[in-house]
Image (cartoon, grey):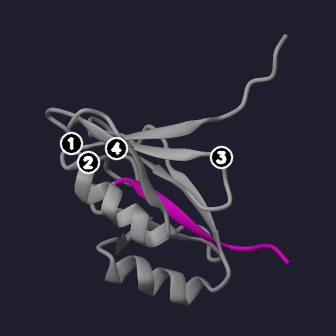
Amino acid sequence: MGNISLACVSIDSADFRALADFYVKLLDGKIAHEFGGHGVSVSLPGTDINLNFLEAEGYGPPVWPEEPGKQQQMEHLDFFVDNLDESVSRAVELGATKAPQQFIPEIVVMLDPAGHPFCLIPKPH
């Protein structure tokens, strides 16, 4: 069997350009490709993995933590950070919010501008 490797992660939202802009700024990425007005691909420095942001008609943000009968998260992103407090502050400045409930003291769950949860995790030394 041939090798399989991850090329990208695709994320839906009502405003793909605004969400892509948030992650470009948060991760020092850049727009690598446009999908005919329906999405963009963001390249991430130091990796071969892109984040794709796609328009989704009727998009509804996930509820986190999950609640019965509500839109649940389909995925979430985890990011290693050098300084947790600085990274949380930067994410908030760019439009994220800190999730109202936190479950693991060493990890901070954030919600991006479209409501997708992502985690900021101190980089292991």
What residue is disc 3 on?
48
Which of the two discs, 1 and 2, sits closer to the camera? 2
Which callout, 3 or 4, points at the residue further toward the start of the chain?
Answer: 4
Mark 2: few/some/many CA within 10 Å (<14, 14-19, 20+): many
Which callout, 2 or 3, points at the residue further toward the start of the chain?
Answer: 2
Q: Secondary structure at mark 1?
A: loop
User: Where is 25 relative to 49, above or below?
Assistant: below
Which of the two discs, 1 and 3, sits closer to the camera? 3
Mark 1: few/some/many CA within 10 Å (<14, 14-19, 20+): some
Which of the two discs, 4 and 2, sits closer to the camera? 4
Q: Are marks 4 and 1 in contact (CB under 8 Å)?
A: no
| Image x and y of residue 50, in percent | 53, 46
Magenta residues?
Answer: 116-125
Judge whether residue 118 is colored magenta: yes
What residue is disc 1 on?
60
Which of the two discs, 4 and 1, sits closer to the camera? 4
What residue is disc 4 on?
40
What residue is disc 2 on?
16
Q: Amino acid at mark 4?
A: Val
Q: Residue at x 27, y 55 (%)?
A: 114
